[in-house]
Amino acid sequence: MSIWNLWPVMGLAILLGVSSCGRSNDGRPTEAPVAQPVSGSVEEAVNQVAQGKFVDDCFRGTESKLREMARALDQRTTEIRDLSQQLAKKNQSHRLIRLGPIVAVEPKNREIPASKWLRMEYDWTMAYDFFKRIENRAVDEDWLELNSVVRQMLSSESVRLVDGWDFADGRNSEPYLKSVLEKIDLCYQDPNCFLPELSESDRSYILRPGYFTNAYRELQKTSVRTERRKWIELLRKIVNGRLQSRAGFRVNPEMRQTAPGKFEVNVDAGDLESAKAELASIVESYWRDSTHSISLRWQPKREGLYRILADMAAGSRAYVHHLEKTMHLYSGVRTAVIAHEFGHIFGFVDYYYETWDAGTCRYRSEWDEGDLMSNSSGGAVLPKHWELLKNSYPLSASDR
Ligand SMILES: [Zn+2]
């Protein structure tokens, strides 16, 4: 077992659900961008990140180590792909399910861990130390792990350094964001308000280092009332975007509750057209308990439907792109991950948190082991998910 054996996100989906529709005054997005997987050349991905507008000293400080790892991984692309396919075939605890152009991986025993928050911290130095321990060995499972870890971290680095997202809101942020938004909202609704009445703790939250709140500082600086109203509106958008990506729910107009606890959702099978029966049975087996169920209803392609796409590149990752209404799957995806991605189509946001600490140049992930929307590689659908679905898709009067 390596240091990475807790890694929750291998092969799994980062979702940072919302698309970046707007930019703040400092060029940073007002909502979390979609994290794209890093497939193909690792060094090419490093080059792209290195040109990012928001590149910082943390990145510069470890860039040469990162490039060394990238070259080592790129030299072994074929061996890494071959070994990962061999291991998947040999793995006795899993079976493979052919889904049209891709293959999904199903554990023979679906063990559901109890609900429990776990956390893990990681940075380039840890990855590099791991690399140094294995660099003289032939490609083995540790290399596969390094490959996943480096690609995963590069994807986060791209969101942080190219897109400009700050990874500042973690598991405990929700009450602060709610409190701040409430006060900004009050001010926004009152045309005669030119400064929200934030408490000391509100201010200390949105003015902490690394948090992009130029809008608040600009608001304090100017005495022009129309300018202030503009900053208040932007600030409201920023805080709301953060709250939505942490605690929101995206109602899907193609989903409805047809009888108490029974739901139906229209989806376009897209690239998985030839495997839609198998796919529906996988998804429906996760999203079901004694009193609740969700049925997928396959529909021909049309506006408004989510469409399933198969990504054929090696080292890919599953994700949902809400703006484009697409779900991306790849060969080797776990069935639980597919069920997690469908959770996004049903309206759920991700319930795990990745934060960045500029002081230590480290990321931290926190996730609940037992929750499918938090631990997409092994969690379960919980009563709270059904409650949220019932509230979000109320029965129509005639069905009640
Ligand atoms: Zn997700």
Image: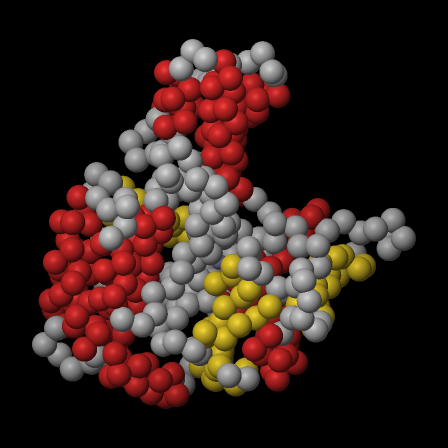
Residue 169 screen position, x and y as percent: 40, 40
Image quadrant of residue 346? bottom right
195 up-or-down from 107: above or below: above
What residue appears at the point 27 percent right and 50 percent down from the top-left corner?
52
The residue closer to the viewer here, 346 or 238, is 238
Seen at 48% across and 82% down, the residue is 103
Residue 20 visible here: yes
Seen in the picture, residue 164 relative to 252 is either above or below; the reply is: above
Residue in the foreground of this view, choosing between 293 and 276: 276
Left or right, 91 with reference to 248: left
The residue at 48%/41% (across/down) is: 22
Query: Of 394 and 384, which appears nearest the observer?
Result: 394
Q: Is residue 380 left or right of residue 35?
A: right
Residue at left offset 49%, top offset 13%: 225
Residue 237, percent across and down?
A: 51, 34
Which corner quadrant of the image does residue 63 belong to? bottom left
Q: Is residue 241 above or below residue 126?
A: above
Q: Where residue 83 appears, x then y in whole percent? A: 29, 84
Q: Can residue 294 be seen here?
A: no
In the image, taking residue 209 as reference, residue 58 lies left or right, namely left
- How is the model colour-coded? secondary structure
Q: Position of residue 206 (x, y in %)?
A: 39, 28
